[in-house]
Image (cartoon, rainbow, N blue to C red):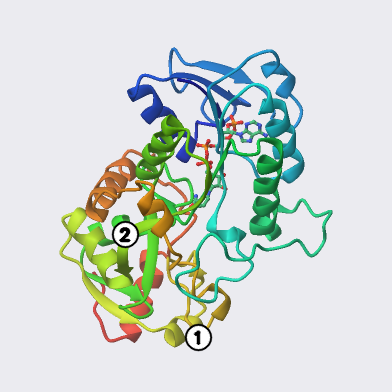
Amino acid sequence: MRILVLGGTVFLGRHVVEAALARGHDLTLFNRGQSAPGLFPGVEEVHGDRATDLGKLAGRSWDAVIDTSGYLPRVVRASARAMSGSTGHYTFISTVSVYRALREPGMDESAPLAALDDPTSEDVQANYGPLKALCEAEVEAALPGRSLILRPGLIVGPWDPSDRFSYWPWRLARGGDGLAPGRPGRQVQVIDARDLAAWNLDLVERGATGTFNATGPARVLTMEAMLRGCAEGTGSGARFVWAGDEFLIKRKVAPWMGLPLWLPETDVDSRGLLAVSVDRALAAGLRFRPLGETARDTLAWLRTRPQGHQWKAGISAQREAELLAELGSSPP
Ligand SMILES: NC(=O)c1ccc[n+]([C@@H]2O[C@H](COP(=O)([O-])OP(=O)(O)OC[C@H]3O[C@@H](n4cnc5c(N)ncnc54)[C@H](OP(=O)(O)O)[C@@H]3O)[C@@H](O)[C@H]2O)c1
């Protein structure tokens, strides 16, 4: 198939491109050429800003478009409209953050979507979910019956620039006592970018349309099982020292970013964030590699990064040691 990827050079898009090339598809990438120009030798890259330079794609056609880089409704409207006469199928990568409230586990795709308080806002930091919901609507309006909306949870694996999940394989590979957050039985969800990319392509190849939550795994994964999977995947003998919500909150450890995937259960609005229903995706063929493989490959990739990388997520070894000491554990 001839596939246009809007983006394609950082994380999820990069895996989509790699997988599509491995399947023999003919790719065009449209991006600004800032993040990783020339990443895929031999693959056509059209350089431009999607907010202003879509004209560079005029007069061309593709069997499918995969949009991994849309955040603003105005910008996504422009690409979806521009592509409506140029493609038979448009994937928009959205997010589970589109839901109005994620208070209950098991929310499915029919749950109400978040709305902007200020309809003029383009503040992606503050309004990521509501803006993505509006982007979805733009795609559906421009390509009715030809759009595929995927709503991933936390995407993880090699090339993740956010450092969130990556903290765990990195930390656990160091061994010793590891500070484990919250309640061991608390559900968490992640999806390996490579599994998401492969499934996205399966759906594109089948011409599938509709809206799907896209996270995993298929069965409930607890925080403890996630950490154990990371430890096993990285060959680590780390032991877990559990710190409850109250302990961590009192010591100002940041939920989600300080100890990734940890959300205090007192935060009622996020109780369902890591427990959405993936029944629809499973029925449509979404499959997952073992978490240990994701952890192992993530660690291998992390080890290729330059020394002195400034982590965007996780706590320092020193801070962890201080907290462990309070819990009566010796540092690793
Ligand atoms: N990470 C998560 O856990 C998570 C969870 C749920 C949903 N999501 C969604 O998943 C997607 C992941 O994105 P990704 O960053 O991994 O995708 P990606 O396609 O690998 O990287 C982003 C691409 O967009 C291009 N780009 C950025 N701004 C652009 C612009 N103004 N005009 C043209 N191209 C532009 C970048 O290249 P240049 O910089 O060279 O332009 C780059 O190629 C996002 O839609 C996000 O909302 C992520």
Residue at 48%, 79% in the rendered image:
264
- Amino acid type indicated by mark 2: Ala
Local secondary structure at mark 1: helix
The percent coordinates of residue 302 (x first, y second) are: 34, 45
Front position among marks 1 and 2: 2
Beta carbon at label 1 within 8 Å of ligand 1: no
Which quarter of the figure has residue 193? Answer: top left
Local secondary structure at mark 2: strand
Graded by Cα atoms within 10 Å as few (under 14), some (14 to 19) or many (20 or more), the crowding at tag 1 reads few
- Amino acid type indicated by mark 1: Lys
Distance from Cα at disc 1 to Cα at disc 2? 34 Å
Q: Is residue 163 above or below residue 77?
A: below
Q: Looking at the picture, tell me which residue is in the foreground, 321 or 196.
A: 196
Q: Which residue is mark 1?
A: 250
| Ligand 1 picture quarter | top right
* Quadrant assignment for the N terminus: top left
Residue at 34%, 46% in the rendered image:
285
Q: Is residue 174 visible?
A: no
Residue at 22%, 65% in the rendered image:
228
Residue at 27%, 86% in the rendered image:
328
Residue farthest to the front, as pictured: 145
Q: Which mark is residue 218?
A: 2
- Residue 199 falls left or right of residue 13: left
Q: Which mark is residue 27?
A: none
Which quarter of the figure has residue 244? Answer: bottom left
The percent coordinates of residue 18 (x first, y second) are: 38, 28
- Residue 37 falls left or right of residue 286: right
Q: Is residue 275 visible?
A: yes
Q: Is residue 171 above or below residue 330?
A: above
Which comes sooner in the sequence, label 1 or label 2?
2
The percent coordinates of residue 2 (x first, y second) are: 49, 19
Q: Is residue 327 above or below residue 122?
A: below
